[in-house]
Image (cartoon, coloured by chain):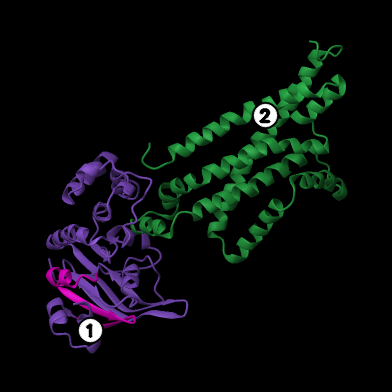
Chain colours: A green, B purple
Amino acid sequence: MELISGVNLKNLMFMLKTGLIVTIYLSIIAITIGTLVGSIIGWARTIANEFFDSIILLFVDIIRSTPLIIQLLIAYHLPGFLGINISTILAGSIVIVLYFAANCSQVVKAGIDSVTFNQWRAAESLGFSYFQQMRYIILPQAWRAMIPSYTGFALGIIKDTSLISVIGVIELVRSGQIIISRTLNPLPIWFVIGLIYFIICWPLSKMSRHLEKKAQFGEK
Amino acid sequence: MAGKRILELKNINKYYDNVHVLKDINLTVEQGDAWAIIGPSGSGKSTMLYCVNSLEPIQSGEIFFQGKKLSEQNKLEIHESIGIIFQNYNLFPHLTVLDNITLAPHKVKKIPLNQCRKKAIKLLEKVGLAHKKDAFPHELSGGQAQRIAIARSMAMEPKVMLYDEVTSALDPELVQGVLEVIRDLVREGMTSIIVTHEIAFARECTDYCIFMNDGKVEEVGPTKEVLNNPKNTRTKEFLQKVL
């Protein structure tokens, strides 16, 4: 390999693989736990009274109105300041999960709100319990409104996991920087890393469009 | 069958915040009777239907259905036994016509799906729309959607049917088809309370008539009497305007 002559190729591949695993790990926990927490928060907002809703909204707004990179830096320094001993990657993971949950909760809330009150009323009049109304009538309609923005946020968080590199966690982008510092040949490395992100995100983006189509009533 | 009390309203009062929308409503409906409720917009007619069906809470008074007092605890039971048809149909847009009709009996009453389907087809034949069973609500005309809504409600085998101005969102030429379905049900002995602006239909099809104004029952009696010889001056004024 001409491009990286004089450097142990095996070591570089190992570096890249480690970074990729961390990126995938962060993406998966952000999306799974974040979706779970976000859905609960979003749903809770639809039934909460004004007081509780304003508290939840404050939490959501703080997260949504500050840069993720700042939140990561705070998460890096805060445990030490408080005398808590947790690993950097755990602190960063929590921040990324909460960031996704906050955004997801808005999507879920907006999706449920997009279904008209008349649908609730019609469902109630037929004898469905609250959870049956939710499951059979409201969510199938809300889901349709949620798909585009939800997948937008999901794709966003996969790419944004790279920000965790500012607190020293070695994920895909950071591993790229390390490799470049040894090979001194940035362009091909950045192409390879860009390609890896593309390979992860593109199928998801495709799948989202497929789901959107499937959710169009009457085209099943 | 007539003579058996199925529904009783005693001194019902209902407020939306500080607005007193139903004022001391009393009503006794016997099984098999058809009632018309007429009156100007905003007089509380629809609200009364929602209260009868426990879709809206009341602030004072009592409602009895088959001798049982309505409460938060038996709300679901009441929803199952009393059907209501809305002005805007409110079909479920994500389900086919057939699924719209089978969902409640299958999920709420736990009746096996194939049985629900058979029943649904029968009901669709009755409202003349069996050929639309696989259509989605957005593919239906307003009149068709409203007939499907009636079939959906009937699938729960309700004891009482409530109609909330069911033809007022329809194009004039579609009104008759919907009224025919209601007329057939009334003739079969379905206890019905019909909020309507179709005075001619009320005259032809209902036994009793209530005139409501400003949240109060101003006049009540056999439909022909109320419509032909109204005693209350407000009823007279209203009928002069609409007839």
Is residue A31 shown above or below B87? Answer: above
Callout 1: helix, strand or loop?
helix
Along the line of sight, the residue nearer the viewer: B131 or B225:
B131
Is residue A203 shown above or below B47? Answer: above
The image position of residue B6, as x and y in percent, is 22, 68
Left or right: B202, with B65 as reference point: left
Q: Can residue A40 be seen here?
A: no
Along the line of sight, the residue nearer the viewer: A110 or B30:
A110
> Which residue does the numbered mark 1 point to in the structure image?
B235
Badge 1 density bin: few <14, some 14–19, many ≥20, Cα 10 Å: many
- The disc labelled 2 sits on which kind of residue? Tyr
> Measuring 33% from the left and 48% from the top, which residue is drawn there?
B138
Left or right: B204, with B124 as reference point: left
Residue A197: which numbered mark, if any? 2
The image position of residue A162, as x and y in percent, is 74, 35
Which chain does tag 1 point to? B
Left or right: B207, with B51 as reference point: left
Q: Can residue A181 be seen here?
A: yes
The image position of residue B102, as x and y in percent, is 29, 46
- The disc labelled 1 sits on which kind of residue? Thr
> Measuring 42% from the left and 77% from the top, which residue is drawn there?
B15
Callout 2: helix, strand or loop?
helix
Q: Which residues are magenta?
A: B196-220
